[in-house]
Amino acid sequence: ETRTSTYVGLAIIVVALAVRGAICFHDVHQYLESDVDDYRAIAETLSKSGVYGFTQDTGVVPTARRPPLYPIILSFLVLNGSLSAYLVAGLHSLLGCVTVFFVYRASRQMLREIDSHRGSMLASLLVLVDPILLRQCTQVMTETLATALVSVILWWWARHAVWTASIGKNVTLGILLSLAFFCRPTFLVWAGMFCVFVVFAKPYHYSKGRDLIGRGVLLAATVGLPIGYWMIRNYQALG
């Protein structure tokens, strides 16, 4: 069973890389054609000046526009002052592969009581050929990163859904949720739901009330502290 799962996982990685790579590298110049959300502009400014902002005629102007995770990642893909289309294509291919693989792994965990290979393979196949995701992976936009983060979080949660009290596991989940927020702020609602879940929902009902509340507070703090830092940064930079 373990060997079969390993072989299936490897096959999924190979197929996902082939499909997403073919889509992303088919026309790499598509990543430089438009920048409607200013991610490329922010990334290039950040790479050149170290300032999260825009380069204007008057100089570099700090901004709080757009969630910062994706532009920060893109800033490492800037070569000679310009975002590399080939590196973006490689990044999106890799993120697409991560999404498909962790959907498979999460489904394996969720369907472990039944014949999970068929269901897990179907779930990963649907994600692999999803037309919206295939379209968005050719754009300099956050959807590809966001879906990768969601798949990892779902896998982590499914794998550790029967935790005993564990500081490390809660901190890890909090870090993943904060990264999701910095990719798309709407994930803050999801993070809040997780904080409530760890306090009130099964299988946590076997723990003491003090442990449950502490677990929820720890998770909320792990998510909230980076967000608070970003708010302070924005206040200091923008007033």
Image: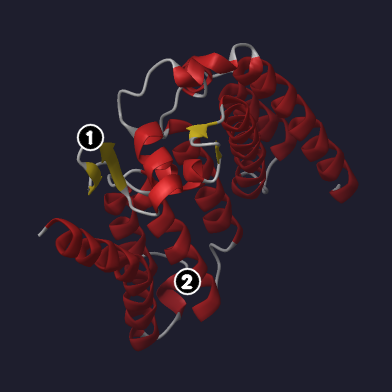
Q: Tell me if mark 1 has few (under 14), some (14-19) or many (20+) residues whose alpha carbon lies within 10 angstroms of its own.
A: few
Q: Nearer the viewer, residue 5 or 25?
A: 25
Alpha carbon of mark 1 to alpha carbon of mark 2: how far?
Answer: 46 Å
Q: Amino acid at mark 2?
A: Asn
Q: Residue at the left extreme?
A: 239
The image shows residue 34, relative to residue 224, as above or below, that is above
Q: Residue 152 — which label?
A: none
Considering depth in this image, is 136 or 63 the residue closer to the camera?
63
At mark 1, the secondary structure is: loop
In the picture as drawn, the residue positioned furthest to the front comes out as 58
Image-quadrant location for residue 124: top right
Residue located 40% across and 33% down the image: 40
The quadrant where residue 184 appears: top left
Q: How is the image coloured?
A: secondary structure
Mark 2 lies on a secondary structure that is: helix
State which mark lies toward you, 1 or 2: 1
Amino acid beneath label 1? Asp
Is residue 218 in view? Answer: yes
- Residue 69: in sight, yes or no? no
Q: Could you tell me if the residues under marks 1 and 2 are in contact, i.e. CB atoms within 8 Å?
A: no
Q: Is residue 159 left or right of residue 218?
A: right
The residue lying at 60 percent from left, 20 percent from top is 24
Residue in the picture at 59% in, 37% down = 95
Q: Nearer the viewer, residue 130 or 97?
A: 97
Provide residue 171's location: percent of width, then percent of height. Answer: 47, 72
Q: Which residue is mark 2?
A: 170
Q: Residue at x 32, y 50 (%)?
A: 52
Count of number-bearing discs: 2
Residue highlighted by disc 1? 57
Front-lying residue, 140 or 160: 140
Query: Could you tell which of marks 1 and 2 lies nearer the N-terminus?
Result: 1
Q: Whole-percent x and y of residue 29?
A: 54, 15
